[in-house]
Amino acid sequence: MAHQLRGENIRFTVYDLSSGAPVPAGVTTLLPDHSVRTAEYVVMLAPEARGRGLGSAATRLTLDYAFHITNLRMVWLKVLAPNTAGVRAYERAGFRTAGTLRESGYWLGRLCDEVLMDALAKDFTGPSAITPPLAE
């Protein structure tokens, strides 16, 4: 967390709008490396906000920003392999599995693998949800 609060990191607050009034539910962060136009992605959601699609939606919007506003070419993340719900949410948002770091993490006190996932700008097609269409 301390690393994310330094430097030129890009942070967004995730809001839950289901009750009408916006309620903060988490954050997404891009940790860019501008020299190679890539960024690591991190998302943190409150436990009560999980399992309702907020993470996938916030991830899609953050990727939209990364590719259409910041002009990154690739965004990557690491997720603990036993976190199958997280892996599925990242896949729904546009990430693909890129590899595995064997025995690099801990899940409930036991060694586990970490899955490396990436999203490429060239695979993130279609109009941006956050930029207006160009006038013809």
Image (spheres, rainbow, N blue to C red):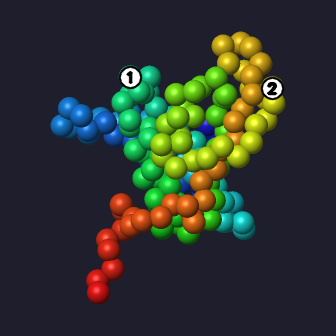
Residue at image mark 2: 103
Kindly identify the residue that appears in the image at 81 percent across and 30 percent down: 102
Inspect the image, locate mark 1, and give the three-letter code of the amino acid beneath it: Glu
| Structural distance between the alpha carbons of marks 1 and 2 | 29 Å
Question: In the picture, residue 130 is in which quadrant?
Answer: bottom left
- Residue 53 location (% of width, % of height): 38, 35
Is disc 1 in contact with disc 2, using a CB cutoff of under 8 Å?
A: no
User: Quick check: can you spot residue 31?
Assistant: no
Q: Residue furthest bottom?
A: 136
Tell me the element at label 2: strand
Of badges 1 and 2, the one in the foreground is 2
Q: Earlier in the sequence, mark 1 or mark 2?
A: 1
Density class for disc 2 (Cα within 10 Å; few <14, some 14-19, many ≥20) is: few
Inspect the image, locate mark 2, and give the three-letter code of the amino acid beneath it: Glu
Residue at image mark 1: 48
Of residues 95 and 25, the one nearer the viewer is: 95
